[in-house]
Image (cartoon, helix red, strand yellow):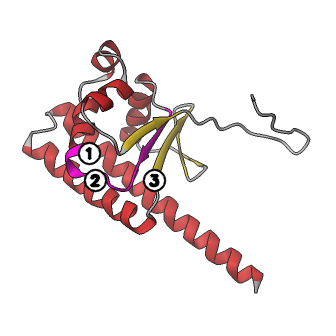
Amino acid sequence: MSGETTSVSKTESAGRIEETAELLRLLCLAESNVSMYAADHPVARRFIQTAYDWLARLLRDRNAPVPITIAENQFVLDGLPMEIRNPLVAKFASRLAEIHINTLFFKPGLTYGEFEAFNGVLGKGPRKINEEGGFAKLLKDAGIENITLQDVSYVMVREDEKVVSKD
């Protein structure tokens, strides 16, 4: 009976990872189109809307923040590293690393306006973002409250090692 519970948990976890991976793919498409055009261009807006609709559903269903983490130019979804085979996803990981983003948290309550502004900030490109004070500052300046940044570290701990807090 406890095996049943574990397999359901694994299935739910796999489903969450697949949903977040799809969000990541949609974010890549939105970012790519915003960098080609601008956030307010009709083509880019279509991709932003599609990504937002998917994200809004995830936020509603989970009723919890949805994190996207980058560790060593690799995405980590629900604590598991994602192998990057798609060049668009690899480019997106590099872009986020260039602007010093470790973990993005999309929070329940995120509006389309905030998401569109987020994409507009991303569309400025790494050089301009860094020159203007960094991504966190630009999010704050744009009034974006439901997308936050946080530093999260992932390290491999072997059986014979133990984790020691920096406190």
**Residue bearing mark 3:** 65
User: Of residues 34 and 164, which is closer to you in this image?
Assistant: 164
Q: From the viewer's perspective, tell me whether residue 13 is left or right of residue 100.
A: right
Q: Residues within 10 Å of mark 2 (few under 14, many from 20)?
A: many
| 153 inside magenta stretch | no
Q: From the viewer's perspective, tell me whether residue 68 is left or right of residue 33.
A: right
**Residue bearing mark 1:** 115
**SS state under label 3:** loop
Where is the N terminus found, in terms of image quarters? bottom right
Give the image location of residue 50, x and y in percent.
23, 56
Extent of the magenta region: 102-114
Gap in angstroms between the C-alphas marked 3 and 2 = 16 Å
Q: Residues within 10 Å of mark 1 (few under 14, many from 20)?
A: many
Give the image location of residue 134, x and y in percent.
37, 21
Looking at marks 1 and 2 on the same chain, the residue that comes earlier in the sequence is marked by 2
Q: From the viewer's perspective, tell me whether residue 166 is left or right of residue 105.
A: right
**Residue bearing mark 2:** 51
Looking at marks 3 and 2 on the same chain, the residue that comes earlier in the sequence is marked by 2
User: Of residues 136 and 83, which is closer to you in this image?
Assistant: 136
Residue at left 14%, top 47%?
45
